[in-house]
Image (cartoon, rainbow, N blue to C red):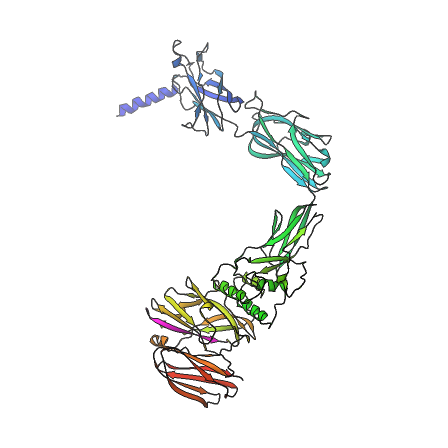
């Protein structure tokens, strides 16, 4: 083994220091490169110590040394390359390249060049010459990556204004120098002030000349041997002008040879003219004007996010409701309109229903024509109870839209209604019409109308829920108890601070562990299945007093609802129900304190789970009572109950015992003989004893 390594080492040493030829391409350049032809030149040097024999048998051309050439998309030789004609060495009188000698050859080929990036070469790939090294037998030339382009953009500006006209060049490849000229077809349109922002090194202002304000000529050359190269678009220089013509006048800026012939010279290839693509520009005078204004509700609260259009021009209102339409053409006709896309339910609440009801009953008229238009949600040009029903259904999530009426309408603020109390009968405008626009118009304000939002609290909805108008909050009370699995329950929901309630709305997020069957409200005689809607475990509830008087008196711990449901698993009442402000903001309207928020409390109770569904659900309505009231209760089985009425002094005013059937029971109590005041109603039976307060007022 030791002897083998000794012999191998000797062979390597002999190879390194042995006399041998070694061919290498030391330089290459393009002479011509077109879309369908290529010509190149190569310098081949023998850097070895012996002559390189190129032709081993004069009678056999197949044993000559060759150079293979390829067009490639990258710098790696692979199957995607296109092979050009081989260069055969050793022909004619050239039979060898002596040691240290340099030999030049020229290769030509005709084919579709396409978008190749490299020209690759392999010298002596068949290994005819026993060279010292095979590692230097490859060579590459970078081709132009794209066609050379000159470009001027199309610009416009107002008379008397200044413009910068950039002149661009694209895809320069080893550029030694160039010249071109630009002619101005209508020199009266502008005056050339200066030339600047020179983008090429070695370019100076003296390389560019303006001739009679009609032509521009440029001559530039590079001092670098390899020339200037860059890919993509680059600003060569800029022409600074002042517009002097009239509106609508234009001047073309054209690359042509009217001053200097168009000519570019590259070091690679050097012998053939460069093909140039030109994109001419244009300068036009457009005397531009602006239109702007503000978009608000009728109470002057701003409406952001409104799209205001002037024909094809669009602007969007900012947080202050302001918009500005720029670059409108003087003398043109424009229609300025506004639009906003939004969910119909945004901004709607039970307050809107109460205000429309008062308007219909002539208790309190809607104060502005814009609120009257907002109340006509179905678009039939009248305000009826159907509009109230549609708003209720929209808030509860029963309908997706109002039909033909859009979510928003916008009316020019400058419009004066002929009959503000009956605007629905008018053909009011929805846009500004500007004919032959000559100057800036900055007072084009709009009044936005959110369909159904007569209370004008849409802006509060942007924050996700309405702000409380008072510091007071009304309360719903549910006893905090553990409920057993797979049982039917009737859960009472009590009130606190619901004094003289006009209407309320809320959404409860029900736990998946319960299945709601029904809701009833013995205390609210006009509450029915149209006042609530359950979808995806979100229970939305909305009620308003349908009577002309407009409010109900509810004492603390009156039973507002009875929730009938079944449990799928053992669960606590605190976990079953929680307010969902995102689904529907919780609020209540009280006659004296206006809009209030709603919260839920879960006080602990000593009532056991087995008795939880035995509540009487005692309720009194109407309250206050004038001539009579209804006493309602829910019995789980037939049996006797005792009813007692006690005044504030503790005296029993009424007492009766009677047998009642199972289910919901209602007993009318005559109060015509009772003195005005507050009374306590107590009901006792097999389900326990419950009491409620009632106010008698004749």
Does residue 431 sit above or below 277 in this rendering?
below
Q: Is residue 400 visible?
A: yes
Which region of the structure is painted magenta? 484-497
How far across and down, in percent of the image, does residue 155 sit? 65, 39
The quarter of the picture where residue 688 lies is bottom left
How far across and down, in percent of the image, does residue 349 sit? 53, 66
So how many labels did they put on this image? Answer: 0
The quarter of the picture where residue 561 lies is bottom left
Q: Is residue 324 left or right of residue 538?
A: right
Q: Main secondary structure of the magenta part?
A: strand
Of the pair 284 and 144, the residue shown nearer to us = 284
Quarter of the image with the N terminus in it:
top left
Of the pair 551 and 113, the residue shown nearer to us = 551
Quarter of the image with the C terminus in it:
bottom right
Q: Is residue 105 left or right of residue 319?
A: left
Of the pair 349 and 127, the residue shown nearer to us = 349
Q: Is residue 298 visible?
A: no
Does residue 141 sit above or below 646 in this rendering?
above
| Residue at 68% over, 50% down | 434
**Residue 487 lies in magenta, yes or no?**
yes
**Residue 396 lies in magenta, yes or no?**
no
How far across and down, in percent of the image, does residue 10 sit? 33, 21
| Residue at 35% over, 22% down | 12
The quarter of the picture where residue 17 lies is top left
How far across and down, in percent of the image, does residue 660 sit? 37, 82
């Amino acid at each position: 083994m030791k002897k083998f390594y000794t012999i191998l080492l000797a062979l390597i040493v002999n190879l390194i220091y042995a006399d041998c030829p070694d061919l290498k391409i030391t330089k290459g350049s393009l002479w011509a490169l077109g879309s369908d032809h290529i010509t190149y030149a190569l310098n081949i040097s023998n850097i070895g110590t012996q002559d390189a024999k190129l032709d081993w048998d004069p009678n056999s051309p197949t044993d000559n040394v060759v150079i293979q050439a390829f067009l490639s998309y990258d710098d790696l030789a692979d199957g995607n390359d296109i092979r050009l004609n081989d260069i055969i060495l050793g022909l004619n009188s050239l039979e060898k390249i002596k040691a240290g000698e340099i030999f030049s050859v020229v290769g030509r080929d005709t084919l579709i060049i396409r978008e190749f990036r490299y020209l690759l070469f392999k010298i002596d790939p068949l290994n005819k010459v026993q060279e010292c090294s095979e590692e230097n037998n490859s060579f590459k030339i970078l081709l132009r990556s794209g066609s050379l382009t000159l470009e001027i953009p199309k610009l416009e500006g107002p008379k008397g204004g200044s413009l910068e006209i950039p002149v661009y060049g694209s895809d320069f490849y080893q550029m030694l120098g160039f010249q071109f000229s630009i002619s101005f077809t209508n020199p009266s349109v502008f005056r050339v002030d200066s030339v600047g922002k020179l983008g090429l090194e070695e370019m100076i202002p003296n390389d560019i000349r303006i001739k009679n304000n009609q032509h521009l000529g440029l001559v530039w050359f590079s001092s670098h041997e390899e020339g200037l190269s860059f890919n993509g678009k680059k600003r060569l220089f800029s022409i600074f002008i002042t517009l002097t013509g009239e509106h609508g006048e234009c001047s073309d800026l054209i690359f042509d040879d009217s001053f200097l012939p168009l000519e570019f010279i590259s070091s690679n290839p050097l012998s053939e003219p460069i093909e140039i693509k030109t994109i001419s520009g244009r300068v036009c005078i457009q005397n531009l004007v602006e239109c702007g204004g503000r978009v608000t509700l009728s109470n002057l609260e701003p409406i952001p996010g409104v799209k205001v259009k002037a024909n094809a021009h669009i602007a969007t209102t900012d947080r202050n409701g302001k918009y500005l339409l720029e670059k409108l053409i003087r003398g043109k006709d424009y229609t300025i309109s506004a639009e906003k896309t939004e969910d119909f339910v945004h901004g709607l609440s039970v307050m809107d229903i109460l205000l429309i009801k008062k308007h219909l009953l002539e208790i309190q008229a809607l104060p502005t024509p814009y609120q009257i238009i907002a109340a006509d949600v179905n678009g039939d040009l009248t305000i009826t109870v159907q509009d109230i029903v549609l708003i209720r259904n929209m808030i509860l999530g029963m309908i997706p839209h109002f039909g033909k009426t859009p979510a928003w309408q916008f009316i020019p603020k400058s419009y004066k209604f002929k009959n503000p109390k009956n605007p629905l009968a008018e053909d009011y405008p929805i846009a500004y019409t500007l004919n032959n626009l000559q100057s800036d118009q900055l007072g084009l304000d709009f009044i936005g109308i959110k369909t159904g939002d007569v209370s004008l609290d849409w802006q509060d909805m942007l924050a996700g829920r309405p702000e409380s108008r008072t510091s007071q909050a009304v309360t719903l009370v549910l006893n905090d108890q553990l409920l057993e699995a797979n049982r039917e329950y009737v859960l009472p929901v009590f009130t606190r601070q619901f004094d003289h309630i006009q209407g309320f709305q809320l959404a409860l997020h029900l736990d998946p562990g319960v299945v709601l069957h029904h809701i009833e409200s013995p205390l609210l005689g006009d509450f029915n299945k149209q006042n609530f809607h359950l979808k995806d475990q979100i229970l939305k509830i909305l009620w308003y007093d349908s009577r002309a008087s407009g409010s109900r008196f509810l004492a603390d711990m009156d039973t507002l609802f009875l929730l009938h449901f079944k449990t799928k698993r053992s669960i606590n009442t605190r976990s079953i129900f929680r307010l969902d402000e995102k689904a529907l903001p919780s609020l209540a309207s009280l006659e004296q304190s206006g809009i209030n928020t709603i919260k839920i409390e879960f006080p602990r109770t000593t009532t056991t789970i087995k008795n939880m569904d035995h509540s009487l659900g005692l309720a009194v309505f109407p309250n206050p009572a004038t001539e009579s009231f209804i006493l309602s209760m829910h019995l789980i089985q037939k049996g006797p109950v005792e009813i007692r009425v006690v005044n504030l002094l503790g005296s029993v005013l009424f007492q009766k015992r009677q047998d009642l059937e199972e289910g919901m029971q209602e007993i009318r109590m005559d109060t015509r003989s009772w003195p005005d005041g507050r009374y306590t109603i107590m009901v006792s039976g097999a389900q326990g004893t419950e009491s409620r307060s009632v106010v008698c007022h004749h």
